[in-house]
Image (cartoon, rainbow, N blue to C red):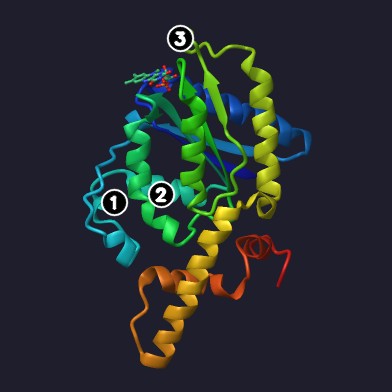
Amino acid sequence: MIRMFSYVGSAAGSTSHTKELSDRLAAALAELLRERGEDLSYECLTADRLQVSLCRSCNSCFGTGSCPLDATDDVGELKQRLLEADIVLVGTPVYLAQMSGATKCVLDRIAFWAHRLELAGKAGMALVTTSNNHGPQVERQLRELLQCFGLAMPEGLCLQLHASPRLDLPEEADPAIAAAAARLLTAWEHPAAHVTKWQELLWRELALQTRRRMMRHYVLGEEVPEETRVLDERRIATYDSLAAYLRFLRGLDG
Ligand SMILES: Cc1cc2nc3c(=O)[nH]c(=O)nc-3n(C[C@H](O)[C@H](O)[C@H](O)COP(=O)(O)O)c2cc1C
């Protein structure tokens, strides 16, 4: 059973174009998996179903790995769903040439995951709907932000709707949706092949920092920050690249 979780940063709920795109991608992926005798579990949450407070810049998450706001809103639960999933979708409508505030607000709350590649080993995809413009730019930006968490991210899916009626994504979208489902499945099966150059740079930076901090801990007795402890436990510094680490996670090494 492959578990896919989707967060859609639109408060249009069941009438959201972006949610419909997510649902149709899930149906296309389920079809591909059925042909291989595998099942897909899928859940999608839209912004209207979640209470998400604005990040208060207290920086606790970077220092301790936990956010005090999680106890007061739904982000703790949202994080749990993201961590339990094998495949993560993040969808956004284009609002004023950018991703929606609801989408960015959630990303801000999990920004510290970029310091620990928290989602490495999973595949992800950015989904975008727009009436007329800025879809490809927003898809690329969202994809690059999600790559910071270590996700294997093939090119995402962006639909320009030309103000089509709600809940009526054009049928011409079917081939693009089927192709995106195939890309996503390949990324899930071969995450190491999807690592980008700049994900490797991020990886190298974190590995170097981990080695340096652990050395100072052993030699000088310096305290180890939470994010370094996590990376050390995950053996980040023992691999030369993110691709090598992903192969290790999938049991192709050691
Ligand atoms: C506040 C707001 C701003 C928008 N800004 C843009 C825009 O800059 N460019 C564009 O092409 N469409 C824009 N749209 C249209 C939405 O991107 C489009 O309708 C999208 O499919 C809505 O997705 P949803 O149904 O999932 O919320 C905007 C819509 C809203 C409500």
The percent position of residue 145, horizontal first and vertical second, equals 46, 45
Q: Amino acid at mark 3?
A: Ala
Q: Give the alpha-carbon distance from disc 1 to disc 2, as whole Å.
A: 9 Å
Q: Which residue in the structure is indicated by mark 2?
A: 79
Of 181 and 141, which appears nearest the observer?
Answer: 141
Q: Which residue in the structure is indicated by mark 1?
A: 70
Of 94 and 171, which appears nearest the observer?
Answer: 94
Look at the image and tell me in which quarter the N terminus lies. Answer: top right
Q: Is residue 106 visible?
A: yes
Q: Give the alpha-carbon distance from disc 1 to disc 3, as whole Å.
A: 37 Å
Q: Of discs 3 and 2, which sits in the foreground? A: 3
Crowding around mark 2 (Cα neighbors within 10 Å: few <14, some 14 to 19, many 20+) is some
Look at the image and tell me in which quarter the C terminus lies. Answer: bottom right
Q: Give the alpha-carbon distance from disc 3 to disc 2, as whole Å.
A: 33 Å
Which residue does the image show at 57% across and 29% down from the upper left? Answer: 157
The percent position of residue 205, horizontal first and vertical second, equals 49, 66
Q: Is residue 112 above or below residue 185?
A: below
> Dots 3 and 2: beta carbons under 8 Å?
no
Q: Is residue 39 visible?
A: no
> Dots 1 and 3: beta carbons under 8 Å?
no
Q: Which residue in the structure is indicated by mark 3?
A: 163
State which tag comes first along the sequence, 3 or 2.
2
**Which type of secondary structure does the marked residue at label 1 adopt?**
helix
Crowding around mark 1 (Cα neighbors within 10 Å: few <14, some 14 to 19, many 20+) is some
Of 76 and 144, which appears nearest the observer?
Answer: 144
